[in-house]
Image (cartoon, rainbow, N blue to C red):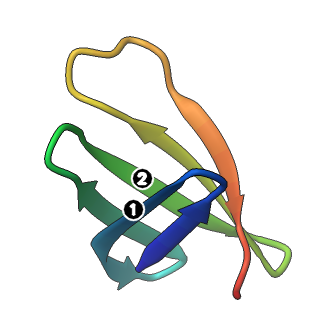
Amino acid sequence: MKWDIPGNSYSGVGLLSGNVFAVGWGTAKNVGVVLYVDSGGKLVGQWGQPGGTDLGSETLTRN
């Protein structure tokens, strides 16, 4: 899996189990995990990073 965000690019590996898609990702300086759930044809995700206490959110779209 690859994320292209303006100014940054991240890659990781994912596993699909039922309607949950789990992805672990990393760079030389950061790592994290994202859990996506199918929500009406969209994959809605929550992510976190080590040492963090807040969760981020995003919607996955196919490029």
Residue plotted at (18% across, 38% down): 29
Label 2, residues with CA under 10 Å away: few <14, some 14-19, many ≥20: many
Which is nearer the N-term, disc 1 or disc 2?
A: 1
Using residue 60 as the reference point, say whether residue 3 is left or right of it. left
Residue plotted at (14% across, 48% down): 28
Label 1, residues with CA under 10 Å away: few <14, some 14-19, many ≥20: some
Under circle 2, the secondary element is: strand
| Above or below 61: residue 10 | above
Residue plotted at (23% across, 39% down): 30
Using residue 38 as the reference point, say whether residue 31 is left or right of it. left
Give how far apart the Cα atoms at labels 1 and 2 are: 12 Å
* Residue 58 in picture, x, y percent from top left: 67, 49
| Above or below 23: residue 46 | above
Taking the view exactly as shown, the residue that stands out farthest to the left is 28
Q: Which residue is mark 2?
A: 34
Under circle 1, the secondary element is: strand
Q: Which residue is mark 1?
A: 10
Taking the view exactly as shown, the residue that stands out farthest to the bottom is 63
Taking the view exactly as shown, the residue that stands out farthest to the front is 7
Q: Quadrant of the C terminus?
A: bottom right
| Above or below 18: residue 28 | above
Kind of residue at badge 1: Tyr
